[in-house]
Image: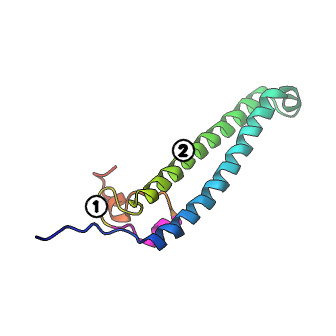
Amino acid sequence: MIQNAVSRYNDDDLSEFRALIEHKLQKAQHELNFYSSQLRDMSMNPDAKIKALDDGALVSENELISSMAARQEKYIQHLENALIRIQNKLYGICRATGKLIPKDRLRAVPHATLSIEAKKNPFIK
């Protein structure tokens, strides 16, 4: 009887990726804290900002910082999900093809769930 062996990264590789992701996660959380403090400062002390900016610019700046904070929250969630995949030993496996995502891609985009091959396929989301 032939067993189908699913190819995966070994524990040493997973440890390397875990360290990379944890570093990026720490940096991302620091940036999110910065954006949150900016928004808090704007809401707590609007008079100081109004002197420097007119109302339209103030609203625009608030929207920009809010958007950046939302993107950062999404990025953090992707990184946390990657840590779960490492824990489950599923990290680095393309969710569309089932093949290993190359290490270079994972080092560049450690939360990637698709290989470049799958990403270029217009039928895969």
Query: What range is drawn magenta here?
Result: 100-108
Foreground residue among 37 and 13: 13
Give residue 74's position: percent from left, percent from top.
54, 44
User: Which residue is more in the foreground, 68 or 98?
Assistant: 98
* Left or right side of 73 for 89: left
**82 falls in the magenta region:** no
Residue 87, by quadrant, is bottom left
> Where does residue 69 sit, x and y in percent of width and height?
64, 41
Q: Position of residue 35 (x, y in %)?
A: 71, 42
The foreground one among 104 and 53 is 104
Which SS class for mark 1? Answer: loop
* Circle on res. 97: 1
Which part of the image, by quadrant, shows the N terminus? bottom left
* Whether label 2 touches label 1, CB < 8 Å: no
* Residue placed most toward the observer, 98 or 90: 90
Residue at 71%, 34% in the rendered image: 62
Q: What residue is drawn where x is 82% and y is 33%?
A: 53
Q: Which residue is the site of mark 2?
A: 74
* Dominant secondary structure, magenta: helix
Q: Tell me the distance, in whole angstroms, between the alpha carbons under discs 2 and 1.
A: 24 Å
Residue at 31% x, 69% y: name it: 7
Check disc 1: other Cα within 10 Å, few if <14, some if 14-19, many if 20+. few
- Which three-letter amino acid code belongs to the residue tagged 1? Thr
In the image, taking residue 120 as reference, residue 71 lies left or right, namely: right
Residue 68 figure quarter: top right
Residue at 67% x, 45% y is 32
